[in-house]
Image (cartoon, rainbow, N blue to C red):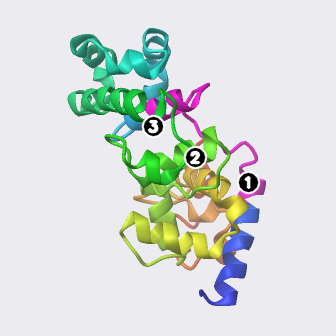
Amino acid sequence: MPPPALVRRARRINRTLAARYPDARCELDFTTPLELLVATVLSAQSTDVRVNLVTPALFALYPDAWAYAGADRVELEELIRSTGFFRAKTDALMGIGRELVERFDGEVPARLDDLVTLPGVGRKTANVVLGNAFGIPGITVDTHVGRLARRLAWSAQDDPVRVERDVAALIEKREWTMVSHRLIFHGRRTCFARRPACGACPISADCPSFGIGEIDPTKAAAMVKG
């Protein structure tokens, strides 16, 4: 069990970030679990903005698992080319379609143990789908969550699974999905990888890494995005 003082600090940080980012959410556009699963696969080594530009046409042409299972490879590759690594992602999407049709009656399963058996789906993608499509709490450890967890001394690990475990021990289960969104928002807008805007950070008083970035409030405020 983590020290009680660390738990209290982590939960206080989560509340502060909730006030700072009341609109924190998954920034991938979707209407169904399958759409979110596909969009999350496409977001690897890409941006949510880029994926959201691609998915309207993709979702219109591929509305269900059967469509991905029987996709024309050349057509699918061309549709998702701009997201990068499009050949590997095409393999994953077609494979996901086949697996969903053959094993899950064409439906996206709502269990982590099932989701991670699908091609191209790891715990990060599975937790995105569980938390945002099914309302099942999950911690999504992307580059932002991993970086902030270490800066906040919530975890000393680099392995995403271990970071997930450490954060889960600090934050109430009902908050797992939202704390992930808040950390991602904060990492994209204030706590940057190269030079965080420390002087404009709402959690600076609770951050053991305060001072690694710009501490002048005016200069830091000018760095904040969004």
Q: In the image, which disc is placed on residue 20?
A: 1
Q: In the image, which disc is placed on residue 130?
A: 2
The crowding category of the residue bearing disc 1, from other C-alpha atoms within 10 Å (few below 14, some 14 to 19, many at least 20), is some
- Amino acid beneath label 2: Leu
Question: Magenta includes 2?
Answer: no
Name the element at disc 1: helix
Sequence-wise, which precedes: disc 2 or disc 1? 1
Location of mark 3 (residue): 40
**Pair 1/3: label in front:** 3
**Pair 2/3: label in front:** 2
The x and y percentages for residue 10 are: 66, 74
The span picked out in magenta is 17-38
- Amino acid beneath label 1: Arg
* Residue 212 visible in the snapshot: no
Q: Quadrant of residue 87?
A: top left
Instruction: Give the position of the C terminus as an image quadrant.
Output: top right
